[in-house]
Image: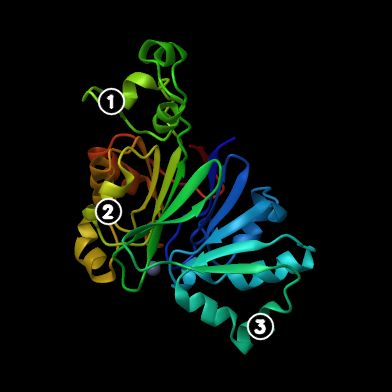
């Protein structure tokens, strides 16, 4: 099943029921760990997610509530006898930290290959691609360099059988249609791709946007996203605090979901000051009805 399991919904300070940021995205049998706060290993066990299934780890930024769990995690992978390579997508600083003598002492000798990919400076870049999906990094607007991640199913375009005979499509033209192009005939006739392709089912997509100040400019990159996770650290009554700490309010998260024309919004990264997150959910819902406040250990289908 394609889904995201939330391992922690809190911001910097964990509370007894809410851990800090980490989640596992399952998409086409691939398991991606997104952020890795302290306590992630415990949460993986509680969520019944096999450590061995994790294919890659994506770290958004180097605030401790997003990456402190990585040391124990890597060490445990070795202890569990992991042999297959692990990819780690992270800000430049993490590779420096992991190569330091202190981290080497903490983590021990790795029994598997660790491929560290430094996140690019550009606003929006493809950082991963396989047969079924792509992942793009998105530069966010936080106190330190921070990236969001956009996981997208790859479109597979099929050409309508009747269109092939109707338009007498050549092999080159069929390939062009499959690659998403319109057909331009020498006589000037243009046959649109939409007319030639089999109507596609909506593609799966998931965007992870945490942590950031309200940053409407990036909504363009994730237009029509099926499931959007956006931080909503504060209620809007605390807007000055949100601005000061480069975080978003629940109302702003709703506004962002609207701008991105998201299908559904999942809010998280809650301040520990909120005993219950109902108010945050209510506030976001006033702007974007299809909102749910994420719960620790809960899974949400894509
Ligand atoms: Zn942060």
Does 86 sit left or right of 163 as displayed? right
- For the N terminus, the quadrant is top right
Q: Give whichever of discs 2 and 3 has the lower sequence position.
A: 3
Please name the residue that numbered disc 3 is placed on. 104
For the residues labelled 3 and 1, the Cα–Cα distance comes to 61 Å
Which numbered mark, 3 or 1, is in the foreground of this view?
1
Q: Position of residue 50 (x, y in %)?
A: 70, 51
Q: Position of residue 131 (x, y in %)?
A: 56, 42
Q: Quadrant of ligand 1?
A: bottom left
Does 219 sit left or right of 60 as displayed? left
- Residue shown at 28% from the left, 58% from the top: 248
Of residues 234 and 58, the one drawn nearer to the viewer in this rendering: 58
Please name the residue that numbered disc 1 is placed on. 185
Q: Is residue 265 above or below residue 213?
A: above
Residue 218 numbered mark, or none: 2
Are discs 1 and 2 less than 8 Å apart at CB?
no
Q: Give whichever of discs 3 and 1 has the lower sequence position.
A: 3
């Amino acid at each position: 099943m394609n889904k995201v399991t939330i391992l922690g919904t809190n911001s910097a300070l964990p509370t007894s029921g809410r851990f800090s940021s980490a989640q596992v995205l399952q998409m086409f049998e691939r398991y991606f760990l997104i952020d890795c706060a302290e306590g992630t290993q415990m949460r993986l066990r509680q969520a019944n997610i096999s450590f061995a299934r994790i294919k890659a780890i994506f770290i958004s930024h180097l605030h401790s509530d997003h990456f402190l769990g990585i040391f124990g995690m890597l060490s445990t992978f070795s202890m569990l006898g992991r042999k297959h390579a692990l990819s780690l997508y992270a800000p430049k600083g993490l590779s420096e930290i992991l190569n330091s003598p202190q981290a080497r002492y903490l983590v021990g000798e790795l029994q598997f290959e660790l491929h560290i990919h430094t996140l690019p400076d550009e606003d929006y870049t493809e950082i991963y691609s396989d047969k079924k999906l792509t992942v793009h990094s998105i530069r966010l607007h936080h106190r330190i360099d921070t990236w969001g991640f956009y996981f997208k199913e790859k479109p597979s375009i099929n050409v309508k059988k009747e269109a092939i005979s109707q338009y007498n499509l050549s092999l080159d033209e069929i390939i062009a249609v499959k690659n998403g192009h319109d057909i331009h005939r020498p006589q000037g006739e243009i046959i649109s791709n939409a007319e030639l392709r089999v109507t596609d089912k909506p593609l799966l997509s998931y965007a992870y946007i945490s942590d950031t100040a309200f940053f409407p400019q990036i909504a363009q990159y994730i237009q029509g996203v099926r499931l959007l996770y956006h931080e909503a650290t504060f209620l809007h009554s605390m807007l000055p605090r949100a601005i000061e700490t480069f975080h978003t309010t629940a109302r702003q998260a709703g506004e962002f979901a609207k701008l991105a024309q998201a299908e559904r919004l999942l809010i998280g990264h809650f301040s520990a000051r909120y005993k219950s997150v109902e108010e945050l959910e209510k506030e976001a819902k006033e702007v974007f009805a299809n909102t749910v406040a994420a719960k620790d250990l809960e899974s949400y289908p894509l």
